[in-house]
Image (tube, rainbow, N blue to C red):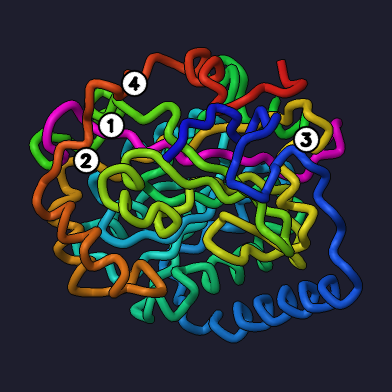
Amino acid sequence: MAPDRTLPGVIRGGGSPGADPAAPSPPPDLRTAYRLRWRRRRLLARAIAKRRQIVPVVDRTRTIAPDAILCFLCVRNEAQRLPWFLRHTRALGVAHFLAVDNDSTDGTAELLAGADDVSLWRTGASYRLSRFGLDWLTWLMIRHGHGHWCLTLDADELLVYPNWPTRPLQALTEWLDASGREMMGALMLDLYPRGPVGDAPYAAGDDPTDILHWFDAGNHMIRRQAPMGNLWVQGGPRARAFFAAEPRRAPTLQKVPLVKWNRRYVYVNSTHAALPRRLNAIYDETGGEEVTGLLLHTKFLDQIVEKSQEELMRGQHFANSALYTEYYRRIIENPTLWTPRSTRLRGWRHLEALGLMSRGGWI
């Protein structure tokens, strides 16, 4: 993969041949706009139809304040990661978590149900057949997210943004409101340890970045996809180590996790793209910068080897599970992702200097 430092916050060129992310994104024609509108409606209808698959365990949504920032997540067997995830996300300023537990067996449901700022639903239905949990979360966002700034995250994603240690998320969302912005994009940055991924012991409640403090800084490719105008970023250690022969099949890294939600909105493919189409305009088409964050991806903690064995058997995490069979098998072999070209995690200013996120006009 060719290095490309002009990532989501600083789109000035680069990307794949024939797809210049700095060029203005043409609006869809009437037929395409019509199709996108009906696609959004079908996905909303699908979520409403799937609402009976989730059963409330603890519903504390009556305590949600009108200006509360909410976090939506779907989890399965994440008792190890959740203590730090909750601590970090609360510290940002999230006031309430709305979680769907998909048949956890490790105490995840009990951990979440015992937290005063969490509302919890459970389901035994297929994660894959619910659009990887999006149907369930979309229904909860219709019911409870309307008018709120909403974060949609996985338990292995830690949101950071420029000045995050000193500027709470509410200050950022107020600035986004004042700037007329409905969303903020973020690049998922895969973190990994120095040695084999399964050999660094991690204890629940510890900061995972004390172990996972390496990343790939420059081997990313970027393009813009029609017809939704969303960015498609691939690269990092997973593309390098597991998809070197077919880099276009590597996992997608660009997301739109923070949105001022409306009950008529919907995510299309995880949080990589959303409808209406304007929610994907997380970049400045004039060559300037928009504020963007990062999702520090803590996938490669020591439990990844065991989890990959389980997911290889379940086949629930990818639409084309056969395509990822070799991916899981490679992880089960406990690989080392670190190379002499790896970059050490040093803080948000360093990440901004590398072009991996941008403050835009946010101070």
Tell me how far mark 2 sits from mark 4, CA to CA.
18 Å
Tell me how far mark 2 sits from mark 1, CA to CA.
8 Å
Q: Which residue is mark 4?
A: 343
Q: Which residue is mark 2?
A: 301
Which residue shows up at 62% across the image and 63% down it?
267
Residue type marked 1:
Pro
Dot 3 falls on a residue whose secondary structure is loop
Mark nearer the N terminus (1 vs 4):
1
Q: Which residues are magenta?
A: 177-197
Residue type marked 4:
Thr
Q: Which residue is mark 1?
A: 208
- Residue 342 visible: yes
Q: Marks 2 and 1: CB-CB under 8 Å?
A: yes
| Image vertical order of residue 192 relative to residue 302, above or below | above
Which residue shows up at 49% across the image and 28% down it?
91
Residue type marked 2:
Leu
Dot 1 falls on a residue whose secondary structure is helix
Residue 21: percent from left, percent from top: 70, 42
- Label 4 neighbour load within 10 Å: few <14, some 14-19, many 20+: some
Judged left or right of residue 228, residue 180 is right
Say if the magenta span includes residue 120. Answer: no
- Label 1 neighbour load within 10 Å: few <14, some 14-19, many 20+: many
Residue 126: percent from left, percent from top: 37, 79
Residue extending farthest front: 17
Mark nearer the N terminus (3 vs 1):
1
Q: Which residue is mark 3?
A: 284
Say if the magenta span includes residue 179. Answer: yes
